[in-house]
Image: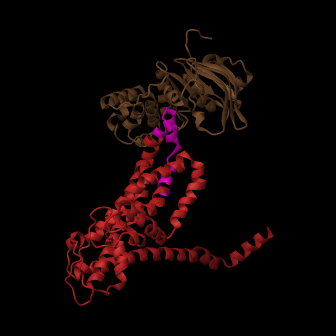
Chain colours: A brown, B red
Amino acid sequence: MDTTKNIKFNVQSLNLFYGDFQALKDISFTIYENEITALIGPSGCGKSTFLKTLNRMNDLEPNVTLHGSIQLDSQDINKDMDAIELRKRVSMVFQQPNPFPKSVYENVAYGPRINGIRKKAQLDEIVEHSLRQAAIWEEVKDRLHKSALGLSGGQQQRLCIARTLALEPEVILMDEPTSALDPISTMKIEDLASELKKNYTIVIVTHNMQQASRISDRTAFFLLGNLVEYDTTIKLFSQPSDKKTEEYITGRFG
Amino acid sequence: MASQKINTLSSSKNSTFQKIKNEYFWRTIIIACGLFIILLTLGIGFFLVVKGTGTFIRMHHTVWEFLFSSDWSPFDSTTESGGGVGAAIYIFGSISTCTLALLFVTPFSLASAVLMTEITPNAGVKLFQPAIEIFVGIPSVVYGWIGLTVLVPFIKQLFHPKMGGYSVLAASIVLAVMIFPTITTVSADAIRSVSSEYRKAAYGMGSTRWQVLYKVVIPAAAPGILTGVILGLARAFGEALAVAMVIGKTRAFPADILSPTNNLTAAIASDMGNSANGGEQNLALWTMALLLFIISVFFIFLIHIISGKEKKKHA
């Protein structure tokens, strides 16, 4: 497709089973650097499952078997990499905002701390920088040392993004990050994602097709464990080549 | 269908009686039972206060003397008074054995709680949980007896203390074993109830299992763990029989942890039956009982403060 972009993830014939149930069927595609890739599809289509394989969160679930290869910068993430190291490079933001029951500061400092950064000045700098990047610094700068659980849902989600940014990952995986939020918070997260793609690669699962069309560069449409169509977002939403994609994006099912 | 109709008919006939029976009868009984328990607790508290303050009001001893003097020589008669009622040795005995017991058991309890919830959750539910519940059901005299026949001779052989194996150490170890299930089960519940969202978040950022546990799960469970520790401590303070069997019941401050001493509960248990009702010694023992009551009320108060704070934080 586009030769000027670097390939971040290269997925080849990925099959995933929960016990006997096949949740992903022969998925192959590439995710490009500094882009937002949206994964859409009806509930249970495998989009979240696929997202989890990108940083091996599926390792934590029992009875999962996986065949095929996923390469991050030409390295096989299941064979050549340690899951812990992988997750520091490819970090995840979840559907439910889930800040730790600690202060705002401690939430953001968590990542640097587990990476062994101890100096107060350095931590202060990372915390401020991450919160600014996540566009929440102005709202929390006066309450850095109060519990993060006192923030609104939208603020909590941006805090979770800041917490992820503090790790300086290469890729941010977002699993329906706005489905629990109000429209204004959703807009803020979308603006944030568009801003962050300058420095990061973002893969976002969403069941909101407007959201996918608004913010993503490329979109992958999943159905019943199959990757039905993958193309630039403009192409996929204006001239889908598969009939099922067309039916889904025009709201005929899902 | 038919029987339902008959039911509706008969209930409408006796509706007033039915209503009284259904609505008020059981409700009254339940309220009465509830109130009775509350009154009983208040009654015991009131009784202890009345009896326990006799030392200060009727015998004119000072609170200071009771708490900090080690001169224990009360008269055991209803007519004479003027002896010493210093309970400092007993108080120190209780505090030192309970503190040591906590120091011994907390690491083990915490480790067991983590093992049964995070590391082997399946075996935790099937194996550890029942095993620990059995622990709770063992009568304290059995613990005391095992302490007496196994632990005391063992300490004697190992350290050759001058006074034999009866010691603060023996009492602390017996107490530690006795409060182990309390602290472990409450801590395990606290760890289990930590939201899995926190774990997901921590793993999703590349934490190791140890980091998830140490930096996220245990801090989030800390108030619950602390509640378990306080409950254990309260149980340790109240335990009489098992401690009495191994502490040596010697009225002296222990020189070290291998020396015998005595504590509040053992002293009350061994002297209460023989003391003349209303005499100086009898009243001093009541004061010690009141002190134990105050300590346990304080612990319960503490637990409420901790859980109240926790609720506020999550609201």
Q: Nearer the viewer, residue A29 or A73?
A: A73
The image quarter in which residue B226 lies: bottom left
The answer to whether any part of residue A43 appears in the image is no
Residue positioned most to the top: A3
Percent position of residue B17, x then y: 63, 80
Q: Nearer the viewer, residue B159 or B23?
A: B159
Residue span colored magenta: B185-211
The residue sitting at 44% across, 39% down in the picture is A152
The answer to whether any part of residue B267 appears in the image is yes
Q: Is residue A198 above or below residue B270?
A: above
The residue sitting at 51% across, 64% down in the picture is B136
Q: Nearer the viewer, residue B9 or B233?
A: B233
Considering the image in quadrants, where does the C terminus of chain A appear? Answer: top right
Q: Is residue A197 above or below residue B296?
A: above
Percent position of residue A239, x then y: 68, 17
Considering the image in quadrants, where does the N terminus of chain A appear? Answer: top right
Residue positioned most to the bottom: B79
Residue positioned most to the right: B2
Task: Residue B199: say if magenta.
Answer: yes
Count of number-bearing discs: 0
The residue sitting at 71% across, 18% down in the picture is A241
Percent position of residue A79, x then y: 60, 25
Q: Is residue A6 above or below residue A125?
A: above
* Left or right, residue A188 beside residue B273: right
Percent position of residue A203, x then y: 56, 25
Task: Residue A113: say if magenta.
Answer: no
Task: Kindly report the secondary structure that dominates the magenta region of the rendered protein.
Answer: helix
* Left or right, residue B143 beside residue A250: left
